[in-house]
Image (tube, coloured by chain):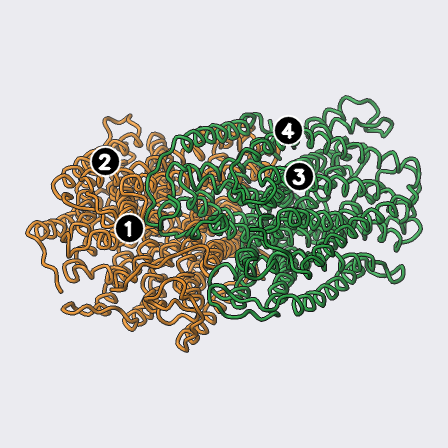
Chain colours: A green, B orange
Amino acid sequence: MVIELTALDSNFTIMIVIIAVAGLIYAVLLAFQTLKHPTGTKEMNRISNAIQVGANSYLKKQLTSIGVMVAILAAILVMLPAHQPEGFPSIRLGRMLAFLMGAGFSATVGYAGMNIATRANVRVAAAANKSFGDAVKIAYRGGTVAGMLTDGLGLLGGIIAFIIFREWAFEVLLGFGFGGTLIALFYRVGGGIFTKAADVGADLVGKVEKGIPEDDPRNAAVVADLVGDNVGDCAGMAADIFESYEVTEVAAMILGLAAFPPAIYGFKGVLFPLMVRAIGVLSSIIGTYAVRLRGERENAMRAITRGYSVSAVASIIGFFILSYFYMQGLTDLNTGSAIVWWNFPVAIMAGIGLAVSTNFLTEHFTSTESKAVKGMSKACQTGAATNLLEGIAVGYESSVWAIVSIAIAIFVSVIIFGTLGVTAFYGVALCGIGQLTLTGNNVAMDTFGPIADNAQGIAEMTKDESFTPRAKDVLADMDSVGNTTKAVTKGIAIASAVIAAVSLFRSYIELPLLLGGEELLILDLSIPLIFIGLLVGGAIPLLFSSISVKAVGKAAAKMIREVRRQFAEIPGLWEGKADPDYERCVSISTRAAQKELLPLGILAIASPLLVGFLLSGVALGGFLGGAIIASQLLAVFMANAGGAFDNAKKSIEDGLYGGKGSDAHKAAVIGDTVGDPLKDTAGPALNPMMKVINLIALLVGPLILQVSVISYIAGEPVSSFAFNPSLLGIAIVIILTAALAFGLWYSKRESEEILE
Amino acid sequence: MVIELTALDSNFTIMIVIIAVAGLIYAVLLAFQTLKHPTGTKEMNRISNAIQVGANSYLKKQLTSIGVMVAILAAILVMLPAHQPEGFPSIRLGRMLAFLMGAGFSATVGYAGMNIATRANVRVAAAANKSFGDAVKIAYRGGTVAGMLTDGLGLLGGIIAFIIFREWAFEVLLGFGFGGTLIALFYRVGGGIFTKAADVGADLVGKVEKGIPEDDPRNAAVVADLVGDNVGDCAGMAADIFESYEVTEVAAMILGLAAFPPAIYGFKGVLFPLMVRAIGVLSSIIGTYAVRLRGERENAMRAITRGYSVSAVASIIGFFILSYFYMQGLTDLNTGSAIVWWNFPVAIMAGIGLAVSTNFLTEHFTSTESKAVKGMSKACQTGAATNLLEGIAVGYESSVWAIVSIAIAIFVSVIIFGTLGVTAFYGVALCGIGQLTLTGNNVAMDTFGPIADNAQGIAEMTKDESFTPRAKDVLADMDSVGNTTKAVTKGIAIASAVIAAVSLFRSYIELPLLLGGEELLILDLSIPLIFIGLLVGGAIPLLFSSISVKAVGKAAAKMIREVRRQFAEIPGLWEGKADPDYERCVSISTRAAQKELLPLGILAIASPLLVGFLLSGVALGGFLGGAIIASQLLAVFMANAGGAFDNAKKSIEDGLYGGKGSDAHKAAVIGDTVGDPLKDTAGPALNPMMKVINLIALLVGPLILQVSVISYIAGEPVSSFAFNPSLLGIAIVIILTAALAFGLWYSKRESEEILE
């Protein structure tokens, strides 16, 4: 039975399409505006070109090998059994196309955003010679391109699926989410390894061995380092936030469907999150366009924050108006009691509150002014070991409060929507929607970081005297603001990943019901198989991190050898008379990043399937829970410990405890070098990882519930857990085990040649 | 209704008492035998005395302050409501007395074991001048005193409670377990901080600043360091294993009661684990007495392993015979199908298998011969940062496989006893019993470590020429064997802690049923409150570790200042003409260890109560699950990363990559100093912590199920979760919040004066 749209719902659908397209048009206009600015001297362009070429060649290589995996997965997806409701287009085909769309959108957001960023950097550098205000505006608007692409494409994908598939859109959107998340995982892992291999390699040979400054043009790894900032912080982060954006949308639509069945309530539960998103897009357009300096002396951070506040106020007003007129007449199906309209905007605001508290915690544990970082700089006086111990303690503690604040945000939803079941989790999904309301602003802030960083790098590397001292100051200021905005976005990305994963996790439980079954999965921890799932799920993020941390070590060692080789073999390089071969360093990072995609991709995809098909669908539920909690603990620990090590080093470089070159500084550099791969490679990769495994569970769940080796016999109560070996299950388990073993072997293969 | 014992059960009860007492008598005899050996020269005795005085004064101080807390908790316990069955002595009184007994036994095991150890060391040193075989025998038998006390007292407590309280013994035994676990927590935390403050302080001033060897008598912290080995590895570890021993016993008795109700089956389910333990005691007596060298040239490790094998074979034969004659006629209450007798010994052997695989993994990731450690030593060539990154990756990976092996052990139980419910968890508890079967041998091996270490320290510190070169070689060999035995025991302690915690966790779920209710708690992860509990529970081990790691840093800084001061202010100390003030360093470590007991004790006790009383009893269930998984991941990571850092350093000190004094060595020392507090303070403290919170949940569970602020209304199905604010609940929550806040404030108070 196809449920008809009400007139209001039809109008809303059209509005959402228009707003999504408006967001995209805004992004295109900003891109043209950015490219119109002058590009400075020939020398500057030469450097900027090298960065562009490096970044593009890396992404193209990566997209080629990702393309193969995407094609294989698309073929598997279209073969995967799916519930096919009557009167609807093919779910399997739709899901595959949505998967390709999600992957394509995610790749586009990362690629186009980075492309504009790598072309904006030189224009920012050029503008810095004339006006601080112009430089900031170009950098921010260049970053906003990625931001509005994220917004527009995320919303567009959701509404297209809804228009075609209505109440079955969620089945198709799982493919959309999976496509986006998979690309984000690869961008994150690849970008993280690329950037840290280059960074560590450039620093250890340049700063430590040779004693030359950062961004010195004689250092062969310096272009790879600048490229790394783009592929890691710009492409990786944009794709990461894009997938969080779409995945919370998917989860909210699933849970909206479950909490407020369309047969009773129409499509309110499903369309509401999309309308909230649309309001966010409009608010972001207003707020990002408002970012400009009030006079040449204003702090850039203040202007960015002002734009953020404009967006926030506009969106909150919008939420209340929308909810008042739209979210009336809804009841909680479990209790039968009516739900007051203002519950919905309050749940969304819990998400905004969570974003604010995440920022506060990031500041509290990682800013140079914080007690934590001051304690660490002090500890550097007694050596690297005491610095590291302090940093580990700080990282662990920050993780505790991050999880407590997430627990409080979920608790708010419980208070509003009741202690039981799906309505409360719909509230959690709205919280996730709230966190990512201002995604346009967030991604713009984040991308501002690599643009400013690169602009400063270009200024450093330019040998002619084209930069005024004032321009150099301006660029240094912008670089430091960029570090702050990057850190803030990183915190939001992690918190939103957890909320998104929790929403997906709950969606998994709803799966049998949504597919026409009689009851939910019951993930009772007292069932041994579920407890086993929880244990094994908790271990996966550690395995993932272990592999990615090792990969950075391997790649950095290769980079070190190459930079040393160039200094030794290229005549005139040390004297500045010859150029190093930047290209080779870029390609070392590129190849290193490529190599780990396969084993980590296999690990993320095969491990939940193995647990599901071997132990049962409910064990897989436990697995998801364990993976979420361990990922969250580890990701926040890594991000904040890494950030704190970084700033402890900066404090000492700014003159504390003897400044640069002192023993304390050496201790701080060791801490920073340990923290770098944690905060920029291993930690961020956990965000998409925890969502990939949840989406895999949702996509393959229906099959797992039927053919697992130890299976849940559908339709019977929990006590019917029993051995139910099935031939198909056994075959799948054997294949998955082989795949996992291959992945682990492949990633181990080279571990002997580490760091010789 | 009081259920009568069958004649067989009566006989078994008497046998258990006799065997427990036999174990204790054996311990006393060994103690006398050890003390009969000659104590060497006056100079040696002077040093040994200093260690004894330091160790005793530390433990006495700690026991005094623990005593106050124990008294307060005993008073609270006796007031706590308990189910009082008719015809039985007062449960509340019995529980309080059992609590005192558990605390007393645990304190005794630690104290007496350590006392003998500190008196055995000088005798081992003296014997080394004459015979290698004698030295090994004295050290091992001295260690066996602690081992057999653990065995005998653990078994005795269990059987006494059973004799008096029969089917309600578990209620009383919760108190017994809690008492033991609490003391273990304090011993572990206190001992860990004591030993690492002394170790790090002694090394950083002695080895690094002054360039004098380890155990140089001019170093003021050297006695504190030797004392630390005893209070950490001997008292701390013995109490830790004692509480795992008793807690698995308690859990097995509870689950035995639930799986095989006495009204139907008699006391088979309850007495079986105790009989298994009794077989273990007998086997340990045989096996430990068999440990002696076959000739002067045999490797000490081989002799110890031989004794272990003798015990293992004896016990396995015993299990099969016992099961064949005793565990007949049992059925699974869930499925109604009969359980074959050999299922029980197989479940126990899964535990032995887990112990073996734990040893294998510890070796694989931390031995000097392992690829992991070789990779780390190699990484030291490019500096401390690459060493640390390698070590972190190794630690994470080891944690993954440790959890997988635990999951497999639980899975074996599932295969044997079915996928659902309590019988499978009874199997898990039997697996825990199996792991700790040879506790006598394990603790003996562990205590061998500090005895050998101290004997070597005495030889180093003795200024007269009383040691032959051969004796010094013998003592060095024994020290290195001791390091291995300590590492092995540490692995077993962690794995057994997890299995014990899992068994307790399941017991918590059985609680309402055992207390006469209608149904189990259902810990469904899809209930938001339970998910919140899981998140918060996962955070607790990180907070605990953060505090303990910081505490070591603070204390080590104080120690460094004191040792520097003594070198500067005591005339003639550097020339060896005057003695340093060892006493002051011991008292710095003692005070540092004392200080953190309060906040960490509050954290472990108040946090589960707060979650329970605020969020509900089922949220507390989620909390326990989260805490178990995060504790396990963290504890194994810390133990193995720390062990690997230690051995990477040793490899380099043995001549690899430039040996002592090289840059690689410096990098390795940094790694080791970071690893030390992780593996010896923070990690081991998590073992008792995870059991304290589980026992707290079991003890206060009945109250929590009635008065939590958001409560589970007993007797109704899960869907009855609703707000049920209760005045008592609110009052308790306020008190607990205040206590927690105080604890955190107290531990933060001094963090400003870290490491100046």
Mark 2 residue crowding within 10 angstroms, few (<14) / some (14–19) / many (20+): many
For the residues tagged 4 and 2, is the chain the same? no
Q: Secondary structure at mark 3?
A: helix
The residue nearer to you, when weighing B503 against B359, is B503
Q: Mark 2 or mark 1: which comes first in sequence?
A: 2
Q: How many marks?
A: 4
Q: Mark 4 or mark 3: which comes first in sequence?
A: 4
For the residues tagged 3 and 2, is the chain the same? no
Mark 1 residue crowding within 10 angstroms, few (<14) / some (14–19) / many (20+): many
Mark 3 residue crowding within 10 angstroms, few (<14) / some (14–19) / many (20+): many
Give how far apart the Cα atoms at labels 1 and 3 are. Answer: 46 Å
Q: Where does label 2 land, which residue?
A: B312
Q: Secondary structure at mark 2?
A: helix
- Amino acid of disc 2: Ala
Q: Which x, y percent locates residue A748?
A: 53, 28
Give how far apart the Cα atoms at labels 4 and 3 are. Answer: 12 Å
Q: Which x, y percent locates residue A608?
A: 49, 40
Q: Where does label 1 land, which residue?
A: B422
Is residue B50 at least partly visible in the picture? yes
- The residue located at (62%, 66%) in the rendering is A327
Q: Where does label 4 land, which residue?
A: A68
For the residues tagged 1 and 3, is the chain the same? no
Quarter residue A329 falls in: bottom right
Q: Nearer the viewer, mark 4 or mark 2?
A: 4
Whether label 4 touches label 2, CB < 8 Å = no
- Amino acid of disc 3: Ala
- Amino acid of disc 1: Val
Q: Secondary structure at mark 1?
A: helix
Q: Nearer the viewer, mark 2 or mark 1?
A: 1
- Amino acid of disc 4: Val
